[in-house]
Amino acid sequence: MPGGVNSPVRAFNAVGGDPLFIKYGKGSRMTDVDGNEFIDYVSSWGPLIFGHAHPEIVSAISRQAELGTSYGASTELEIQLAEKIVTAVPSIEVVRMVTSGTEAVMSALRLARGITARDKIVKFEGCYHGHGDSLLVKAGSGLVSLGIPECPGIVKSLAEKTLNIPYNDIDQVRELFEKEGNEIAALIVEPIGGNMGVVPPKPGFLEALREVTQKAGALLIFDEVITGFRVSLGGAQKLYGITPDITCMGKIIGGGLPVGAYGGSRQVMDYISPMGSVYQAGTLSGNPLAMAAGNVMFDLLSKDGVYESLEEKSAKLCQGLQQNVEALGIDAQFTRVGSMFSMFFTSKEIVDFESVKSCDTDFFKRYFNGLLEEGVYIAPSQFEAGFMSAVHTDEEINLTIQASRKALTAARG
Ligand SMILES: *Cc1c(COP(=O)(O)O)cnc(C)c1O
């Protein structure tokens, strides 16, 4: 396997040493093949909002496995999950299941281009939308951590159709749309930046995006692959009260199995085949195991108090971490929306990719390795978010705060 991994973000290039090879996970912890146990804040990069091997999800998967793992024909499980998504997510009337977040986003772009008969796409620097060709330009953490300024292999004429502007910069958005608005098929955004560390939208930013896209006849795509079902059951669009034209989802809705989805109004989604002529297909789409896991995940998330508890625990952790850096006199910025959070080692206010890049990555490297030694696993890059799960205990949060104190002290030298 290239670099020993099947996804480059798992490599330890940015922090030194060998990537972890995991033997098993249970709840908020996982154990590697050498027998080291870690409290896990990567959560498989977002999906595991109920931790590893949640008993109800495991039994739903094994029950379904007994009945068959794929039919190449439709199941009731797909209808059930689709109904839950449509009920929870304000802008979605019709939803198509796919197999990854990347696939959801690629399909959403084709749909937007098909509807508008325009080619150009607007995205924000530091936002990641999967590895589709159109979007792999200034695409956040994975590439920055590995020091890749520009990905080779992207057709130049396609890359030229992707316009990049700084996150949270409303003036540049307006300027761009004034100049080229009638050539733009869609603007795609992570409504809460999650792939350059957590960068929340400034007040009015998402509202402005809705306004300019509408005026230009371009579609607004919310990439909620991370934020969907994490910041609220209705995603960031529910939290901020903005209605996008297309929403992309993934990660949490698969309950830890490979899944993606995209949806929007009936009018928009009727362009998709077999209703319309924008073609998109998938052999394993709506896979029964993933649908079974997703349905249970959704039911667990729908219970009272889940998001309140995630908020409380995440606030507690971040307060503890903040007290540590203050006590030790270390420059750091904290960002958090619900259970997604970041600690950036910089004195600059975090608003966009430029400010994120001002971080002291050598300090992060020492901090990461110190934490790992203390049995706490965070993403092996300064430019990634941390994720709290519903099964992290108060005791584990306290242990994490103590471990962080030690790792910070050691990193400071
Ligand atoms: C993870 C992610 C994707 C890609 O999803 P995959 O399942 O890894 O293909 C797309 N957009 C965002 C915002 C993501 O965080």
Image (cartoon, rainbow, N blue to C red):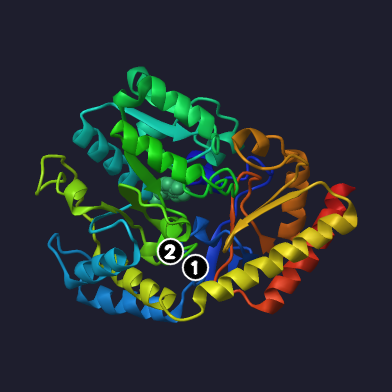
Crowding around mark 1 (Cα neighbors within 10 Å: few <14, some 14 to 19, many 20+) is many
Q: Nearer the viewer, residue 287 or 316?
A: 316
Q: Is mark 1 within 8 Å of ligand 1?
A: no
Q: Which residue is mark 2?
A: 229
Q: Is residue 256 visible?
A: yes
Q: Which residue is mark 1?
A: 49
Crowding around mark 2 (Cα neighbors within 10 Å: few <14, some 14 to 19, many 20+) is many
Q: Residue at x 39, y 76 (%)?
A: 57
Q: Residue at x 85, y 56 (%)?
A: 326
Residue type of the residue flagged with mark 2:
Phe
167 vs 286, left or right, is right
**Dot 2: element:** loop
Q: Is residue 26 visible?
A: no
Task: Give above or below for 140 relative to 19.
Answer: above
**Dot 1: element:** loop
Tag shown at residue 287: none
Among the 4 quarters of the image, the one containing residue 134: top left
Q: Tell which tag, 2 or 1, sits nearer the viewer.
A: 2
Q: Residue at x 55, y 74 (%)?
A: 308
**Nearer-N-terminus badge (2/1):** 1
Q: Residue at x 74, y 39 (%)?
A: 348
Task: Give above or below for 266 relative to 140.
Answer: below
Residue type of the residue flagged with mark 1:
Ile
Q: Position of residue 69 (x, y in %)?
A: 23, 67
Between marks 2 and 1, how big is the CA–CA gap? 9 Å
Q: Position of residue 78 (x, y in %)?
A: 22, 66
Q: Position of residue 166 (x, y in %)?
A: 54, 32
Asked if disc 2 and disc 1 are in contact, CB closer than 8 Å, the reply is: yes
Q: Nearer the viewer, residue 328 or 170?
A: 170
Q: Position of residue 382 (x, y in %)?
A: 66, 45
Among the 4 quarters of the image, the one containing residue 289: bottom left
